[in-house]
Amino acid sequence: MKKIKQILKNTRVIILIFFIVAAFFMIRPQFDATGVAIRNVARNSTAERAGFSSPKATIAPTKRERITEINSIPIIDIDDYYDVLRAIPANRTVQITTDKGVYRVISGNSSEDIGLSVYNAPKTNIRLGLDLQGGTRVLLQPEEKLSSDQVTGLIENMKQRLNVYGLSDIVVRSTNDLSGNQFILVEIAGANEQEVKELLAKQGKFEAKIGNETVFKGGQDITYVCRTADCSGIDRRRGCQAIQEGQMCRFMFSITLTPESAQRQAEITKNLSIVTNQDRTYLNETLDLYLDDSFVDSLSIGSDLKGKAATEIAISGVGVGSDRGSAVTNSLANMKKLQTILVTGSLPVKLDIVRTDTISPALGREFTQNALFVGALAIIAVALVVLIRYRKIAIVLPILLITWLEIFLLIAFAAWIGWNIDVASIAGIIISIGTGLDDQIVITDETLKGKDEKEHSWKDKLKKAFFIVFAAYFTTVGSMVPLLFAGAGLLKGFAITTIIGLTLGVLVTRPAYANIIQILLKD
């Protein structure tokens, strides 16, 4: 008991305890948290119009807004959320209660149409990377060299496009390899490979033409794109029809043009002729839609729009499938993609996909469980070796305690700075653990050597031990620096986690361990 009091009064141990308490608040465990957290709110959606807003990328997971009830029905997890929404018909008022307020949203054609992307409420602030929670990682390379300002603009456009499309938990950052080649790394939780490829592999240049003259373009020429059930979805007048490949369904949604674009349309149409088709009158030219210079659809222009600066117009297109259900799904997916491009405009440069990785959530969970299990076995195995070597439980227990505390502090620090724990980060944690165990053994050996000698010799031995510890630290950190840029930044997580883990070790945990072991081994 006397030695425990000495340990708790030691300055370095007090510093370690302070870091442990701070780490607890960084991780902020909330194991009783229920409901679903909001990942993203789609632009121009009924949810956005009801007052919902997308969480900032820097907000801690446990502070994200949580949905707890829908129409007074408790929401425990994401299955409850979708089950309740699926049972609500389109165009009904839905009351959504969150931990921050009550909202009234108009339901859509499907559970996703209200514009909310959600996931099970997080129970800690620990952020998991794609390897551990599932998702898609895409490495893209611009076709031409970009300036720093152009890269910044490109990243902002890509984030906006992905957010509008409804994808969430997005990481978009620029990186370079050791040869100086530019890359854009995109990581998206919960997205499939095809969705990401369609949004990012194409520049997304949208144009609407009458003849050879451009009426409007996606982005700045459009002030509003309808994404709600009352003015978007499967075209009720034309619906679906049988074709040779199966079924074809036509979608429709309305948009609002800028006054300048509407006036441009009036100037182009004022000299067109009027023709009659099936008792209806149209202009003799059509409004042709092009996406990345490829023809999408052709829309007839009513005769009442001749020379008229109309800001409200309807956009349509088609989707096909082997049966009606798949055709409807494909049609709505095409509509969603086109709406996104109309809102965000085209990317400033075309991007080539260099590499794509997709990991399922189930595989991520399994990997996490296996990593924790194997890590625990490894630490126990090391503890047995240390016990055989020193034959003193007073040495084994502090080594085990400090090892687990180093992992805890490292994960807490990652949660604090918003760093995602992924496979590369786990490799960095393993390196930190291995280095920490090596350092603790060096400190233990030097402490035992000085135990039976005079006091200043004991301190000299510890100084020698820490000279070895810091030499190993600077050597390892130096070897990690090139990995921050190697492999187009894909090894950055490994390098940063290793550097942070080693730094916390040499500055906080290992000095405390040295004092603990010194007190315990004193007679």
Image (cartoon, rainbow, N blue to C red):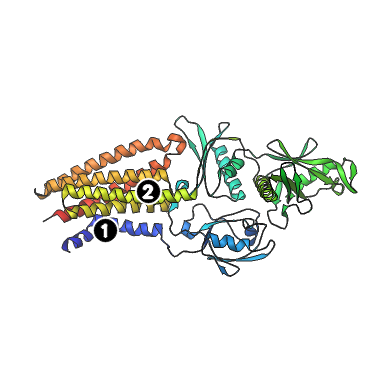
Residue farthest toward the top in the current orientation of the protein? 179
Report the number of numbered marks: 2
Q: Looking at the picture, does residue 96 appear above or below residue 142? A: below
Quarter of the image with the N terminus in it: bottom left
Residue at image point 56% right, 46% down? 192
Crowding at mark 2 (Cα within 10 Å: few <14, some 14-19, many 20+): some
Which residue is denoted by mark 1 in the rendering?
A: 14
Residue at image point 73% right, 45% down? 317
Q: Nearer the viewer, residue 343 or 369?
A: 369
Residue farthest toward the left in the current orientation of the protein? 453
- Specify the quadrant of the image occupied by residue 206: top right
Residue 429 visible, this orientation: yes
Instruction: Judge left or right: residue 75 versus residue 472.
Output: right
Residue at image point 32% right, 45% down? 432
Q: Nearer the viewer, residue 396 or 171?
A: 396
Indicate the secondary structure of the residue bearing disc 2. helix
Q: Nearer the viewer, residue 385 or 481?
A: 385
| Residue 258 place in picture, x, y as percent | 74, 48
Q: Which mark is residue 371?
A: 2
Q: Mark 1 belongs to which amino acid?
A: Ile
Q: Nearer the viewer, residue 44 or 231?
A: 231
| Residue 80 place in picture, x, y as percent | 55, 63
| Residue 168 place in picture, x, y as percent | 55, 51
Crowding at mark 1 (Cα within 10 Å: few <14, some 14-19, many 20+): some
- Specify the quadrant of the image occupied by residue 430: top left
Instruction: Judge left or right: residue 336 versus residue 118.
Output: right
Quarter of the image with the C terminus in it: bottom left
Q: Earlier in the sequence, mark 2 or mark 1?
A: 1
Q: Which mark is residue 143?
A: none
| Residue 157 place in picture, x, y as percent | 60, 43
